[in-house]
Image (tube, coloured by chain):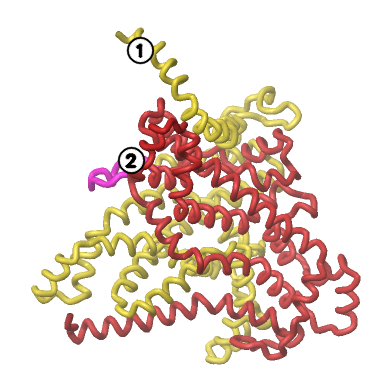
Amino acid sequence: MKAAVKPGLWKKWTNQLDLQSMVWPGIIFVAIFSYIPMYGVVMAFQQYDIFNGIMDSPWAGFMHFRMFFEAPEFWNVMRNTIVISLLKLVITFPAPILLALMLNEVGNMGFKRFVQTVSYLPYFLSWVIVSGFVFSLLSVDNGTVNFLLERLNLIQEPVNFLAVPEYFWSILVSVNVWKEIGFGSIVYLAAIAGVDPALYEAASIDGASRFKQIFSITLPSISPVIIIFMILAIGNLLSAGFEDILLLATNPILRPYSDVIDTYVYRVGILNARFSYATAVGLFKAVISVILLVTANKIARKADVSLW
Amino acid sequence: MRLSLGDKMMQRSIYLLLALMSVIMLYPFWNALVISFNQGSDTALGGITLWPRAYTLENYYIVFQDRRLLNSFMITILRTLSGTALSVFFTALLAYGMSKKTLLFRKQYMVFFMITMFFSGGLIPSYMLIRSLGMLDTFWVLVIPGIISVYNMIVIRTFFAALPDGLEESAKIDGCSNYGIFFRIVIPVSGPVLATIALFTAVGYWNDWFTGAIYITKDNLLPIQTLLRQIMNSNIMTEIGSSNAIALDHMNRNRTITTKSLTMATMMIATIPIILTYPFLQKYFVKGVLIGSLKE
């Protein structure tokens, strides 16, 4: 039986050549631009040399990984990566849910639409522009934040916020919330709109306050959506940020608090041209990320929600 | 529905919070706009918040004199137009093929694509690839690597799969090939989804600065966002001033321009095209995002 399938398969495939020809440009493209770089991670195990290329560079085993674990920056970079990720998970992640819950309580449609439109706006700005706004608002000579704080007599001297390492995490997370909150809320709003109105009616007949209804009806109803996005967020745990940090932490003074794996890879790899070492660090991150993603998905499966 | 006192209080505070949030959302943008219309030396005195104090168009005048800036503006427009057209076309074509249940190896192809969403070679191997393809310092490096988006493919595919079968069957009976159906039937009825994807793709191309930062060293190929970042990190006065005799002359005669005011004007020029497109497309993109979040 099985042997008979094979020639049939080939014939079937050629019979749908037009359909296959729609898919193959995409396959070839992804093979080149995604899979070849995946193969390129063998560089992490080599002493990569530009002139020899991947084929002829000598092998180095786990040397680069060991170098990273023993590097003076290692603990700093890991701490920043994990702390910034967790801060984003605890603050940036729930913020859109909170916004969606609040928007759902708004009866005035005009006001609701206005707030939504305004809150989506930052999503469409590039990080370069956003960092420009942040520099301007926080600047020492005439930034609005210093101006306000001085007016309110909260400070005597202007503060150079982006030169104080301890402030960086708060600034980074606030800016992320500002940029992402509105856009992130779209999906949650849609999920809330899908909740059966009969549930709310029954609850209000039983005398449940709106506040109570949010906790006992809305949140449980949208929890599958929340969990899906949570899994994705956990998979990205080691991608603490890249563009945002690279653009906001231009002052090297911030590095003890701002350097994360991805910015470290960029600096060491591209700027210092230590290709093998940076690839090893990047691979380390990617592997841990996949492990986190698979684990989170497995746990979520117990609650009958999963990505695959 | 009658609201209890507690509910009313909650509602009031929600309105208040949302109003406050709207102000915080808009203020940075508004403030930058105001500064871009204010005389630089006056801005430096501080206290510019809601309205320009010394209104001027000088900042824009000088920025528009700068050849390099106009050039990178053109590069960005070209890049965004060609990238969006190519990306939407090839991604939709792929999505159409993938939406057909009869497609052989459909499952295997899907796994092949999905893997790339969760694992990638990372920055350095990608850089090596681009380098060995000879794409460093070419216009195409700004366009080609982003053409196929697996995420967008899944969004479009979900939409295609939900189209009624009857739509295509009649065309098939008339002897239409899959390409005929794709071009003459599927694309015309998919306007809103494709428009949404096009918007996001265009925003992505327009806002991307990183590709330019790592793959481009030639000044005449720099996208506006990359150039803007360079300007912000250096001194815009020397950047813009030295490249342009008229601007230099202008600055020497009346020294009212500062780095900040010029940066703000440049930022506004790099942003306003996006801001202008998005209110028109808002109702589409909300729908588009929702299609994307559906599971098959």
Q: Residues within 10 Å of mark 2 (few under 14, many from 20)?
A: few
Q: Quadrant of the C terminus of chain B?
A: top left
Query: Chain B is which colour?
Result: red
Q: Which residue is mark 1?
A: A5
Residue located at (21% from left, 75% from top): A210
The residue under the point 80% across, 61% down is B68
Image quarter in which the N terminus of chain B is found: bottom left
Image depth: mark 2 or mark 1 in front: 2
Q: Position of residue A61 (x, y in %)?
A: 58, 27
Residue B248 on the magenta segment: no
> In the structure shown, which secondary structural element does the residue marked by tag 2 occupy?
helix
- Residue B248 vertical placement versus B125 (above, below): below
Report the magenta residues as a range: A292-308
Q: Amino acid at mark 1?
A: Val
Residue B151: x and y in percent read: 46, 46
Where residue A171 appears, x then y in whole percent? 53, 69
Q: What chain does badge 2 belong to?
A: B
Q: Tell whether position A302 is magenta.
A: yes
As helix, strand or loop, the secondary structure at mark 1 comes to helix
Q: x%, y% of residue B77?
A: 68, 57
Instruction: Specify the label residue A107 is tagged with.
Output: none
Q: Chain of mark 1?
A: A
Badge 1 local density, few (<14 within 10 Å), some, or many (20+)?
few
Decide if residue A208 is in sight here: yes
Residue A151 falls left or right of residue A55: left
Q: Most extreme residue toward the left, as rendered?
A: A206
Picture residue at 64% right of the left edge, 42% below the top: B144
Q: Which residue is mark 2?
A: B166
Instruction: Say whether residue A260 is left or right of residue B47.
Output: left
Chain with yellow colouring:
A
Identity, as a three-letter code, of the amino acid under mark 2: Gly
* Callouts 2 and 1 in the same chain: no
